[in-house]
Amino acid sequence: MRVIVRTVSELCITVGALIVLFVAYVLFWTGVNADSERDHQTELLKRQWAKGGTEQAPVPYRNGRPFALMYVPRLGFTWNMPVLEGTGTNTLKKGLGHYTVTARLGQEGNFAVAGHRRTYGDPFKDFPELRRGDAVVLTDGTTWFTYRIDKGPYKTVPTDIEVIDPVPRASGYTRPGRYLTLTTCDPEWGHSHRLIVWAELRSTQPVDTGKPEALRR
């Protein structure tokens, strides 16, 4: 009997240790790796922009590669993330991902972007804090695009793909425009639902004129 009790106790300790290690990996190492990868993707993007000089053109949209940077002041004035083409698992480990079936940045239609709520740098950890009127600013290296949130966070299910339609039905928009959709998982450590915010493009300006007002402290 003692042998059985001791064996069970040892198994429990082993399982507990494995759980602690797994949690440490999820909470710490994926974040460390994601921060490093995010910085790498941002540096890649800035190097490509620098090559263009005064005749700079936007970076092509290539699967798994960065083409823009996003800033959301509500999430912190140091918060910025590379936006990559595609929403595959490996892509979202590197930053935010653009739904390839949606409009391109600044164009008419719905430019839709996904990001992790938790793990891999927790890019959208504070997503529920987003409010109407908040700025979402992006740049493709040539132009600043300032969107303003009109609705959200809106909770739905993963199968609700209408949220990234050119004119999302639940967004409140009723006619074609230049829209932005941000999506992330809900609850914070789950994926049974999605949180959505919708925004509309309000202004653009060349990068050589300086940062837009939304990014000025």
Image (tube, helix red, strand yellow):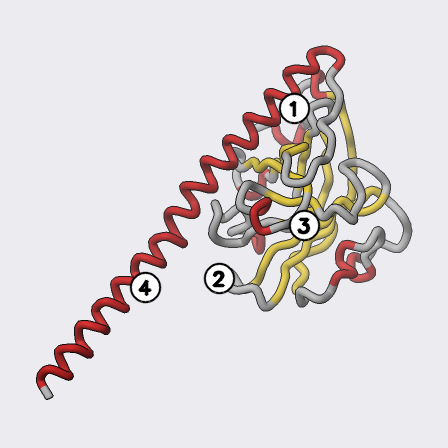
Residue to which mark 1 is pinned? 211
Q: Is residue 153 above or below residue 12?
A: above
Mark 2 in CB contact with mark 4 (< 8 angstroms)? no
Mark 2 in CB contact with mark 3 (< 8 angstroms)? no
Q: Which residue type carries mark 4? A: Ile
Q: Nearer the viewer, mark 4 or mark 1?
A: 4
**Left or right for 174, reference 2:** right
Q: Which residue type carries mark 1? A: Lys
**Left or right for 171, reference 72:** right
Disc 3 on helix, strand or loop? Answer: strand
**Left or right for 170, reference 46:** right
In the foreground, 206 or 132: 206
Residue to which mark 3 is pinned? 182
Q: Residue at x 73, y 39 (%)?
A: 147
Q: Which mark is residue 19?
A: 4
C-alpha gap between disc 4 and disc 1 = 46 Å
